[in-house]
Amino acid sequence: MNSEVRNMVIIVIQRITSAVVALGIILPIFLIGGVPFTFTIYILSILGLREFLKAMETKKELPLFVNFISYIALTFLVLLNVVNTNLLLCIDYRVITGLFLVFLLPTVLYHDQKVYSIVDAFYLIGGIFFLGTSFSLMIVLRSYDMNLLLYLALITMITDTYALIVGSLVGKHPLLADISPKKTWEGTFGGSFFGVLVATVFYHVVVDPTLSFTILIPITLFLSILGQFGDLVFSAIKRYYKVKDFSNIMPGHGGILDRFDSLIFVILGFLFFITII
């Protein structure tokens, strides 16, 4: 067994072990739902924000006050709609206004770009709104329909797993080498093929057998591809800040954002189809 194959086997074993442990913890909470699920997603969002800020601080340490209001803002966004089961959510303009105010005003108070700049402010506004909305939607989706959220999770899990396997075995053509050297076109196609196959069957059998395959398959394919490119967006962030993984909380997977990157984009992309699917 050559070193490349050996490394792939080690990575796969690590990923499977971490995934089994994570599923053993998350699955019961997912099935219970309610407060335990909401609390778990909130904790995951806080850990994700911590990774987001840590990546940013590889270039510049943020003021303590800015760190503090970042966690407060995320808490507010994630828990804003915990009792809402309507997927057609409307964002309160006060939330957006509050984000701009609490992150832009300190640029004047600190009046030192080396400490806290307008670029930092907009990075935080965008990042916290992005993460807060995504994790909040996980809670809303679970309250609305557990199987629907499981369908979206299956798209990302199966797509990511088979993209890794197919890419490692037969991948020869890099997808975007500057961002993620190990990702290949072969892995992308293989991941989407199996992701669409498994998630489509699950949706048809468990969620809604009446929905036409001519609608279901293109939507699932779109979400599978979107999830893979969402992974690349987070890879681009890591490249910019020169970090390999956001953290090592899950050996073989990296951090919370490494594991949830695809699901975040799939959930956001799903909003385009909530009146159809």
Image (tube, rainbow, N blue to C red):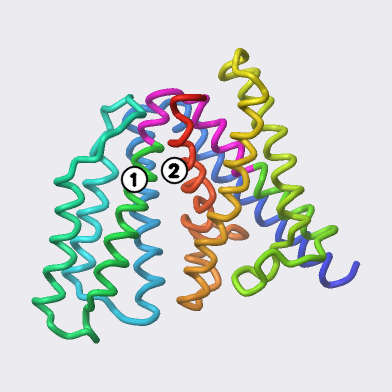
Q: Is residue 95 left or right of residue 255?
A: left
Location of mark 1 (residue): 133
Residue 55 vs 40, above or below: the answer is: below
Tell me the distance, in whole angstroms, between the alpha carbons under discs 1 and 2.
8 Å
Helix, strand or loop at label 2? It is helix
Q: Nearer the viewer, residue 215 or 171?
A: 215
Residue 28 vs 17, above or below: the answer is: above
Quadrant housing residue 32: top left
Label 2: few (<14), some (14–19) or many (≥20) C-alpha neighbours in 10 Å: some
Helix, strand or loop at label 1? It is helix
Q: Which residues are magenta?
A: 139-157
Residue drawn at (38%, 41%), measured in percent from left and top? 40
Question: Which quarter of the figure is the N terminus placed in?
Answer: bottom right
Mark 1–mark 2 CB contact (< 8 Å): yes
Residue drawn at (66%, 45%), measured in percent from left and top? 159
Location of mark 2 (residue): 268
Residue 242 vs 219, above or below: the answer is: below
* Residue 145 within the segment the image draws in magenta: yes
Question: Residue 184, image x and y in percent?
Answer: 73, 61
Question: Residue 245, image x and y in percent?
Answer: 53, 67
